[in-house]
Image (cartoon, rainbow, N blue to C red):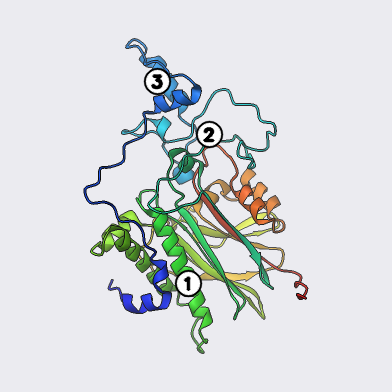
Amino acid sequence: MAWDTNGWRERIGPWLVWPLPMPRSGAEPRPRREEPRREASRREGARRPEPRRDEPRREEARREEARPTGAEDHGGRGRTYGSSTAPAATLAPPRHAARRAQADPERSWWGTPVIGTPVDEFEPRPPESVSYRPDLVVDGWASEDLIVRAASTRGYLHRYRGTPRQDDLAVAFEPRTGSVVFAVADGLSSARHGHVGSSAACRAAVTAMVSALEADPQAGRPLIDWQGLVDQAAWQLIAQARTLLGPDTEPAVAERDFATTLVAGMVRPTAQGTEVSLIQVGDSSAWILADGRYQCMLKSKYTADPEVVSSATAALPRTPRVTPRGGLLQPGEVLLIGTDGFGDPLGDGTGEVGRHFAEVLTRAPNPLSFAGSLDFSRETFDDDRTLIAIWPRTAKPAPRR
């Protein structure tokens, strides 16, 4: 695909390609962390002695005790914590046979809700990243017609490893149409700079939607060129790769090191009701929560349809053909847009996690409570989580004095 960069750069401005420090030429790689037994012994107060040659079975039992059970895929189903290059203890938060008694069994050591068996307590490591990457992002506000809550949290696995949060979000209000535009993205775990890619994709998508809505509408044309939005977000990943790695970086390198999923869309008040439109690249998704039940609005990786399973592997900067989906959001319903760190534990919504959010989202909580609920502790579900929730307002706010 040929990229026309000049016009797009003029529209979004240079601020999206924020300056990032260039890697030093010939720099030595960072030293690996200490071996897991040494790290585990430091946490326990004394180093565990090396096993004798006649105790292989006992040592293997110790390793199995340190490995989590019920491992999940990408923070959800199917992950294998073991590795041929690194023992399991470096890859997942530790598990101990005896858990420390909690003052409140329904709250984790972090003060977040516990659903089922919690993750064991540990002090998170700082993220190693080329740019600032906070552990938690929280946002929340209301327009005349809509209420918005948004949060993105670093997963327990990334906290334990000291790796950055790869999820991100962006949400904005466009006053001419009264629309809320949004994007959520999940940098692929295999992508070295997936967290940079997710941020670039979200900001490019939201900027493109706001620019389209601010322009005078033309008869017979949709408000937003959704395919063009995907192309523009993909270009931003390539631009970020060239900012970080050098101006001659090929798109294939951006695909390898900056790949990310994306769900972008808008909620717009109309005479017919609150209209929702969304597009999807990858396995992040969106749901309608109504009367305690969840209706998935986009393709889901839980379906047996092979076409859907195949599309869930797509990621920017590849640009698949997208078709917007949507409908009307009724009073009393909640639109949820999230990454698979939320979608995996949610499943079909009939389990403990689904019941938890059905109760929490009955009405819009304050933004910090919303973020705390998203950061729930549940063993094996340790991926980053990002969620945007949008409610239609049933009563108009009183005019300001």
Which dot, 2 or 3, sits closer to the camera?
A: 2
Q: Quadrant of residue 41?
A: top left
Pointer 1 residue: 207
Please say if the residues under marks 2 and 3 sit with CB atoms less than 8 Å apart.
no
Query: Disc 2 to disc 1, how far (Cα)?
Result: 38 Å
Pointer 2 residue: 122
Q: Residue at x 76, y 70 (%)?
A: 395
**In this picture, residue 368 sits left or right of residue 213:** right
Report the quarter where the N terminus lies: bottom left
Pointer 3 residue: 60
Residue sitting at the far left: 26
- Residue 393, given in percent of the width and then of the height, sits at 71, 68
- First in sequence: mark 2 or mark 3? 3
Q: Nearer the viewer, residue 22 or 189?
A: 22
For badge 3, the amino acid type reads Glu
Q: Residue at x 41, y 78 (%)?
A: 11
Which dot, 1 or 3, sits closer to the camera?
A: 1
Q: Residue at x 50, y 84 (%)?
A: 215
Q: Nearer the viewer, residue 302 or 85?
A: 85
- Residue 82, given in percent of the width and then of the height, sits at 39, 33
- Residue 383, given in percent of the width and then of the height, sits at 49, 45
